[in-house]
Structures are given as C-alpha cells and as structure tokens.
Image (tube, rainbow, N blue to C red):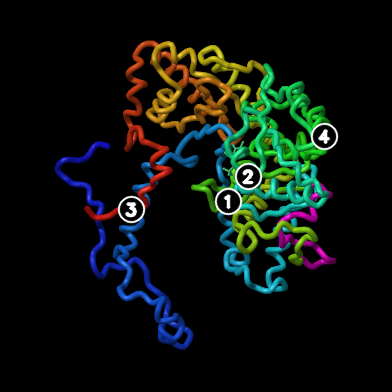
Amino acid sequence: MTMNKTVPLIFERSAPGRRGYRLPDLDVPAVPVGDLIPQDFLREEPPALPEVSELEVVRHYTQLSRRNHGVDVGFYPLGSCTMKYNPRVHEDVTSLPGLAAIHPYQPEETVQGALELMYNLGQYLAVISGLSATTLQPAAGAHGELTGLMVIKAYHAKRNENHRREMIIPDSAHGTNPASCAMVGYKVVEVPSDERGGVDVAALKALVGPNTAGLMLTNPNTLGLFDENICEIADIVHDAGGLLYYDGANANAIMGIARPGDMGFDVVHFNLHKTFSTPHGGGGPGAGPIVVSQELAPFLPGPVVEKQGDRYRFVTPEHSIGRVRSFYGNFLVYARAYAYIRSHGPEGLKQVSETAVLHANYMMQRLKDVYHLPYDRTCMHEFVLSGVWQKEHGVRTLDIAKRLSDYGFHAPTVYFPMVVEEAIMIEPTETEPKSTLDQFIDVMKRIAEEAQEDPELLTTAPHRTPVKRLDEARAARHPVLRWEKP
Ligand SMILES: Cc1ncc(COP(=O)(O)O)c(C=O)c1O
C-alpha cells in the first residue's frame, strides 16, 4: 500500500465521550441492572469499546470495504462458488417488519406468514430437486452434507445395517465431502475419474459391497462436467444397498433442466448462497437445506414445517436425528432465496441455468487455445483450465491468479480440483454481461502473453492492490481478529 508521507494514516480514532448512537427514551419502568443479572456476571469495569462518531464508523467501514473485492465491485469467477449478483429486491423483502421483526420464541399462531414462507421454500426446493421432504436448518453446504450423511446413517441403523460405514467419493470431490464423512464416522473410499472426467464405472463396481453406505457425488462435478453414466452409477450403488448423496453446490447448472431425484439421488443439499443468490460470507449466515426421498423423510432434523388445513405448524419427524441448528436456521436467508425463486419463476430459473452454461462454454471455447484444457468436451456452468503451458515459462497458476487482481478481477478457483495439474476453475455465472466475459478473456490472453514476455511481472504480482501476497493458510489458522494499539 502506498502511504502518504506528509499526512500519516490515522487508524486509532477513539476519543472519550464521542458517540455514534442515541438510545430511545426508556418506555418501561427502570430496573437496577443488579436486580436482573446475578452479581457474579456483572462487569467490574466498562468494556474498552471504541468511542467514535457515526461519521467515523461509516468512513472506517467504507474504507475497509474498498480494499476488498466483492461481486458488487467486479467480476468474481470463483469456480464451484457461484458468485452471482445478489438482487437488491431481496434486501427490500428482508426488511419487511413481518419478517425482520419477529422472534423465534413467538407462538406459531403469530408467525403464520413466516412459517408459510419456510414451508413453500421447502416445497420449491423439493420440486427443483425431484425429491420429497426438506429441512432448511443446516447453516451451509458443508453443514447440509453432515446432516444428509447423518440421515443416511440413521436410515441404515434403523434397518440394522450399522456395518455400512463406507462412503464412496470421487477423486475430483470437494474437500468438504470427505471431511463430512469423517465427522459422521464413515470411512472414505475413493473412486477414480475416467478419461472423460466422470466416475470410473468399472472401478465403482469393484468398490461397492455389503459395507457400502452410499456414494457422494457432485453432478455436474467439480470439473464442470455432467456425468453421462449417472443412471448406471445410481443403479450400481442402490443394488449394493447404498444411498446416493447429491452435493448440490453446482445446482446452478441444472435448474429446471435435470433433477437429482430423477437421476437416482436420495439426498440433496442446496447452497442457498450459491444457486439462490443469498449473500456469501465467512461461513455464514448461510443456509444449506437438504431435500430427501420419502423413505428418508422420517429421519430429518426437527422441527420441520407442516401444513395442516390452512395452518402451518412445527412438527418433529418420527425418527428425527434431532436439531442441527439453533431455532429454525437463518430465516432471513430463506426469505432472500424465496424472493429469488418467486421473482424468477420456473421459466426464469431454467433460463438462469441455460445462461450460466452458455457463458461457461463461450469462455471455454475462447480460452482453450491459450490455456491447456484437459477435458475438451461441452462443459456445464464452469470449466477447468490448466496452467501447465505457462509453467514452462516459470509462471505458476498462483501467479496468474495474483496478476488478475491487478486488472481488477477476482481470481478463479485455483489448484482445485486436484485431479488437474495447475488447475484454474472458472465459473462466470449468468449475471454477467457479455462485455465483462470478453474483458476477462482479453485479460487472460494478455496474461498468457506476459507469461512468455515478462514472467517476473507475474511472479511478483499483484502490483496494484492494498496488500500483496498473504499467507492465507496462516491467516485462517491463526487469525488476528482484534487490532490492538501498539
Ligand atoms: C462442490 C462443493 N461442495 C460443497 C461445498 C461446501 O459448501 P459451503 O461453502 O456452503 O459449506 C462447496 C463450497 O464451495 C463446493 O464447491
């Protein structure tokens, strides 16, 4: 970051007595705090909070936000993450007092509209997935995976098949899949991909057996490829007594066109923050609802919303695995996804997926002469290139990703899926205009030229961002979340 030498950057802005809020007059009888909170829990000293005016708070956060890249700032083709634009109408909806000002402890009778919204959202997700019963509770896609696997485990246990502890996962799978398996105590059995990027069917046949609990699959998978053998794969797993889990992170490619339930899947999770355009963010607040077949419905976490006549009620399914989230999950995230589905309608959702797939294929065709394309076949909503040609000039995929920041773009997903060397996974989404796709293509081509002509420009990138290369793993493992005055 360039610092102005004459005017030092002021970070500490707190000054005693400054205020950025004004509390409304008390409209209930005043009660001494010590009467409400046990003495042991009371602070002895006031908390050391910053004392700042509203203007300073606004400036502080606005300045911080300007140092970040977000979908409101520029193109964000992060593969497998569906960083699409979040329509502003969602924010209008979620600020309606009937949605924003309710409390989860309110009696059901007073929140019928909210229950109706949850019920309808569950129904829509069931229709989109081709399955039967929904829980909205899980707080993210990975949490949906955990919940879905717990449901599968409970199903096998009910049938006295506790020995089924092996979950088959392709080598192209997202890291959360094996992690979720480990969390429920399943053994991960890896199935290789075939030369077209799908599940190797012969290898799968050899892997299934009496201990198979199921198969977890993303379809289209993390290579952006639709598995052409999905019906045969489903039969192989079902014939062995296993169930099929659909990781719906890539559902943006199939809405209104193909349904996991029709492909043979028994459980599906949706990442509402991807497909249904609710904000992403630091692991939450999010929602990763799961939808299951009729057979698995009794095992869902409770409570779920049921419609009885014209009333909506919370009920707990008969063999429920229990709650997986406090209260009813992230309700205002549901409201945004509901608004998204209602404002698009069935035809609109189909158009979303068609456009997402068209955009990805357009970009793939225009980039495949410049970057190696390991699987040269029609892709779905994303595609995976490889930086191996650029590596010959001493430039790694990470350098290409960093250089993209200099041009104002967020990098694609890199080094994933791991089956592709120097992977560059691009997901343009449907919300971008063609002019943005073209700009990005031009920049990617320019960077490929730079890799040949001036590799150091890339290996030392980025040059124009507030910070350069950060140790991301260390930042995640040892986050420093509080600034302290030196
Ligand atoms: C294929 C796949 N599965 C699962 C997940 C996990 O989803 P979440 O980030 O919502 O936990 C992701 C996230 O990027 C993903 O890409």
Instruction: Left or right? Give the position of 226 relative to 102.
Output: right
- What amino acid type is highlighted by mark number 1? Gly
Residue appearing at x 43%, y 25% in the figure: 398
The x, y position of residue 267, in whole percent, is 74, 44
- What amino acid type is highlighted by mark number 2? Asn
Structural crowding at the residue carrying mark 2, measured as other residues with C-alpha within 10 Å and reported as few (<14), some (14–19) or many (≥20) = many
Mark 1 C-beta to ligand 1 under 8 Å: yes
Which numbered circle lies on residue 60?
3
- Total numbered circles: 4
Residue appearing at x 70%, y 32% in the figure: 219
Residue on which the image places disc 4: 240
The x, y position of residue 236, in whole percent, is 81, 30
- What amino acid type is highlighted by mark number 3? His
- Tell me, yes or no, whether the two marked residues, 1 and 3, touch with CB atoms within 8 Å: no
Mark 2 C-beta to ligand 1 under 8 Å: yes
Instruction: Left or right? Give the position of 276 relative to 402.
Output: right
- Tell me, yes or no, whether the two marked residues, 3 and 2, touch with CB atoms within 8 Å: no
- Mark before the other along the chain sequence, 2 or 1: 2
Structural crowding at the residue carrying mark 4, measured as other residues with C-alpha within 10 Å and reported as few (<14), some (14–19) or many (≥20) = some
Residue appearing at x 78%, y 62% in the figure: 306
What's the distance in space between the residues labelled 1 and 3, CA to CA? Answer: 26 Å
- Foreground disc of the pair 1, 3: 1
- Mark before the other along the chain sequence, 4 or 3: 3
Quarter of the figure with residue 23: bottom left
Does the magenta run of residues contain 98?
no
Secondary structure at numbered mark 1:
loop
Residue on which the image places disc 2: 271
- Mark before the other along the chain sequence, 4 or 2: 4
Residue on which the image places disc 1: 286
